[in-house]
Image: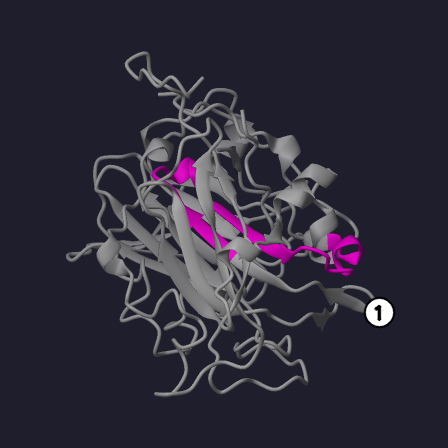
Amino acid sequence: MARETPSQTAGPYVHIGLMPNAAGIAGFYGQDIGSVMVSDPDVVLTGCIYDGDGALVTDAVIEVWQADIGAFGRSAADAETGEYRFETRRAEDAFLTLWIIARGINIGVHTRAYWPGQVPDLPGLDGTRAQTMVMREAGPGAFRFDIHLQGPEETVFLDV
Amino acid sequence: MNEFPPRDRARHPPALYEPYKSTRLRAPQQPLLQMPTGPAEEGGPVFGPDLIGPQDADLIHNFAAEGGAAIGPRIVVHGRVMDEFGRPVPGALLEVWQANAGGRYRHKREGYLAPLDPYFGGCGRVMTGDDGAYRFHTIIPGAYPWPNGPNSWRPAHIHFSLFGQAFAQRLVTQMYFEGDPLIPLCPIVQSVPDADGVAALTATLDMDAAVPMDSLAYRFDIVLRGRRQTPFENNPEGL
């Protein structure tokens, strides 16, 4: 069996390659892939990513995949507020699949954001930490999912 | 369910690699939760060939004014995307980004004193064909300093992002150039656990693919995770 090509960090300039329009480099592509997830969104998901000091990670790119409706999204953490944002639809699955890359992340980290009221049903998942994988309601049609890379609130990351 | 064997974590850099300082506050500290792959990981976004514009795979020209071209040593980068079982991965989307020939990125947070090249953007993409092959044109990026240690320099490199056919295959990596003396000095490269892994990230000069009087060529083959073969597949070259 051949071995997988090793991962390397996406680095701080990942936006050039993955979302040039959002990064202010127009002229490459008509539209950044993942910038429109669905044509008729009914929910907004936002959140921030925090490092081990509780500081905002403002150079990350986060991707979301909804297998049930085949929707893919890609968002950059805002350079000032650190906030990412997805507009999508709530469908059948209990969760959204998330993947985060950034400077200082040697291999992209996988997690899931479960809709409020859902209970992550992964074998071996510690009950108290399971809550790190659940969104909270932030208003009508608005959901919040913060990600903690380290520390007492560290998000559960999956060996995908 | 369980279509992908577990990721070979020993192949990849550890999350925390002290010499690369940015990992210290960003590496998860808890063990990853083991799980079999399921529908959420075994499918993924599909990008048709229509996504790729006529100049997307030509970084020498895709940001240049009409009639212009990026400054730097012209190269072809090509290779094949295969899976761990030796099967080609057709329709894989490769997105690439890089610094210009002086080691400067076109990014608002970039402050290196080397100048921008007005004719170079540093962004491109290409899709693999039925045989898993890909090919794009660019210039060799420059080495550049970065704030890790007092005098840290990145070897010349091109960033790659890959989508295969499943989200479980998602990969971001970097390609280096054969013979670059900065490779052994770079903590990002050296975070890869063994020399064979570093070799896998190092493109080799490929004179057979060079374009005479135009461009040198480098070969960079990529391996993505592989889906287990089903009993219905009867491929004599497979397992």
Give SS at disc 1: loop
Query: Is residue B233 inside the magenta stretch?
Result: no
Quarter of image, res A93: top left
Q: Is residue A64 left or right of residue B60?
A: left
- Residue A84 seen in render: no
Q: Can you name the residue that lies furthest to the top here?
A: B231
Residue B44 place in picture, x, y as percent: 32, 41
Residue B214 place in picture, x, y as percent: 49, 72
Residue numbers of the magenta segment = B160-187
Write the residue at 66% across / 40% down: B197
Q: Can you name the residue that lies furthest to the front here?
A: B212
Vertical arrangement, residue B68 with respect to residue B216, above or below: below
Write the residue at 40% across / 26% down: B227
Quarter of image, res A104: bottom right
Q: Can you name the residue that lies furthest to the left here?
A: A40
Vertical arrangement, residue B82 with respect to residue A144, above or below: above
The kind of residue on which mark 1 rests is: Pro
Write the residue at 36% across / 78% down: A26
Instruction: Count the marks.
Output: 1
Residue at label 1?
A: B150
Q: Is residue A12 left or right of residue B148?
A: left
